[in-house]
Image (spheres, rainbow, N blue to C red):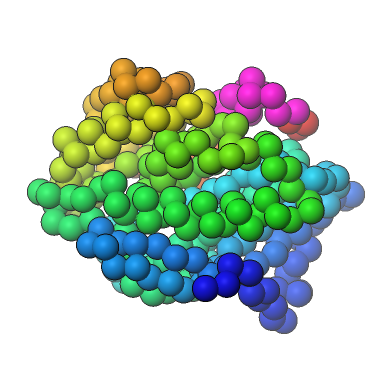
Amino acid sequence: MTTRPLLYACQSLSLGLLLTASAHAKLVEEQFDLPVKARNAWGKVIEQPIRVTVFTDDSRPGPHPILLLNHGRATEADARAAMGRARFSEASRWFAERGFLVAVPTRIGYGVSGGEDVEDSGSCNNRQYPPVYQAAADQSLQLLSMLHARPDTRKDRTVLMGQSFGGATAVTLASLNPPGVVAAINVAGGGGGDPKTHPGDPCSSAQLARMFASYGKTARVPMLWLYTENDLFFGPRHPRDWVARFREAGGNAEFVQFPPHGEDGHALFSRFPKVWQPVVADYLRRQGFDLQD
């Protein structure tokens, strides 16, 4: 299978390619299809293209450090199919304005990418978590390989980031220590949560704790973990246990648990950017990034 990206062009993209960020800067939005390969929890290999959205700010000269941003997982299949194209437009703009090339993949099984659900981890009382996060991580690794070949990126200054399922994917990737990755940010990361049926108590929580502990044994990338006290998917206790297990095994993670925000703090990343942005900016500056507001 070729790994050369297939450029996706359409009238709506060309009309919306440049979005005004200020009087002198424009946010440039690009999208393309990237052939990837991933394996589900039962060993089946799926090969297909996924849609990737890339943002840069044309006032910030390249080559750019990369920020790879992974989306979460809806609890229902209909919602995953209806997701459309993952963009995180406000957060992506914020990072692009600070010099990053922001890459947001829409993974296999979601929205415009479609395909089989390679992230199905099984029944609630016996979840197979590591294989499904590995499936998400494998897609990100293939995307990183492509991005590192671009002339407008830096190969030595990559940041991994994700929200919810994507946050746990960032931890998975950090445990693999990909070349060029210097920092990783996990926002509300985890799996198996459902506010409707078992709020604050994710499926197979013991398996999740063991998974994060196993990641701590190998991860050497410094991390920042962000959660809220009123996260209806994972509650206040489980994230503290996960980061403790990760650190005890050797992982390097700063942990911040914000007070309650909104009716469900799991949505902090999209609904309350002014809360997490100063914390993330401080963290990235301490990792050597020159962030100019």
Secondary structure mostly seen in magenta is helix
- Depth check: 77 or 160 in front? 160
Which quadrant would residue 109 be assigned to in this image?
bottom left
Tell whether 160 sits left or right of 116: right
**Which residue is found at the position 69% from the left and 78% from the top?**
9
In this view of the protein, which residue sits in the foreground, 276 or 205? 205
User: Residue at 85% of width from left, 45% of height from top?
Assistant: 61
Q: Quadrant of residue 227?
A: top left
Which residue occupies 74% across, 48% down? 153
Q: Position of residue 132 (x, y in %)?
A: 31, 54
Q: Is residue 196 visible?
A: yes
**Does residue 249 appear to the left or right of 276 in the view shown?**
left
Q: Position of residue 58 (x, y in %)?
A: 83, 52
In magenta, the rendered stretch is 275-290
Q: Is residue 234 left or right of residue 197?
A: right
Q: Is residue 118 above or below residue 279?
A: below
- Asked if residue 99 lies in the magenta stretch, the reply is no
Q: Residue furthest right?
A: 24
Whether residue 259 can be seen here: no
Place of residue 240 in the rendered image (x, y in percent of width and height, measured from the top left): 30, 24
Residue 76 in the image: state x and y as whole percent: 27, 64
Q: How many marks?
A: 0
Name the residue rendered at 78%, 51% in the picture: 152
Q: Is residue 209 left or right of residue 107?
A: left
Residue sitting at the far bottom: 11
Whether 276 is among the magenta residues is: yes
